[in-house]
Image: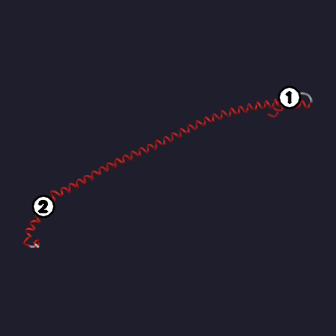
Amino acid sequence: MPQLDPTTFAPQLFWLLVTFVLLYLVMWKIILPKIGGVLQDRQERIDDDLEKAEQLRKEAEAVKEAYEQTVAEGRSKAQETIRAAGEKIAADAAEQHAALTEKLAAQTSDAEARIVAAKEEALKNIRTVATEVTQAAAGRLIGREVSDSEAEAAVGAVFDEEQR
């Protein structure tokens, strides 16, 4: 084998050195800058993506805060509306209760007046009927007719005695 022959070591070492230097120069000037550029582009893309992600996170937080504030305002407005509606309903109920109480009081006083009038009318009718019955009964018992004034006086005396 010629590679193991010690007389050919010097030219082999020369070509090894030339090949190594050429490979080193190709790597240094061509391949490594391309790999470095790719790595740098990748790092820039990652940094840009991180910046965009941070910006989107901040925007999401701002939107979330605005949403929470809107929800809180909506809740407070809803509670205010419910409270106002409750107050209005209570005021309307009190108003209607007062009107109904007034109406019932008026109807009660009208009914009482009608009852008093009916009672007086009934008492007049009773007095008239009692006077007629007294005249008829006295006429049969004593055998003569009793005058209207006598019968009315007798019935009036009994009614006055009953009212005491």
- Where is residue 80? Give x, y as percent: 48, 41
Mark 1: which secondary structure?
helix
The amino acid on which the numbered mark 2 sits, given as a three-letter code, is: Leu
User: In front here: 156 or 29?
Assistant: 29
Q: Is residue 47 left or right of residue 81?
A: left
Residue visible at 20% across and 54% down in the picture: 37
- Where is residue 146? Give x, y as percent: 88, 27
Q: Name the quadrant containing residue 124.
A: top right
The amino acid on which the numbered mark 1 sits, given as a three-letter code, is: Ala
Q: Is residue 116 left or right of residue 20?
A: right
Q: Which residue is the site of mark 1?
A: 151
At label 1, counting other C-alpha atoms closer than 10 Å, the crowd grade (few under 14, some 14-19, many 20 or more) is many
User: In front here: 143 or 34?
Assistant: 34
- Residue farthest along the right direction in this orientation: 143
Which quadrant is the N terminus positioned in? bottom left
Say which of marks 1 and 2 sits in front.
Answer: 2
Mark linked to residue 68: none
Eyeballing the image, is 26 above or below 119?
Answer: below
Residue visible at 61% across and 34% down in the picture: 99
Q: Name the quadrant containing residue 115.
A: top right
Eyeballing the image, is 36 above or below 101?
Answer: below
Q: Is residue 37 left or right of residue 126?
A: left
Eyeballing the image, is 83 above or below 14?
Answer: above
Q: Which residue is the site of mark 2?
A: 22
User: In front here: 13 or 130?
Assistant: 13
- Where is residue 67? Give x, y as percent: 40, 45
Q: Earlier in the sequence, mark 1 or mark 2?
A: 2
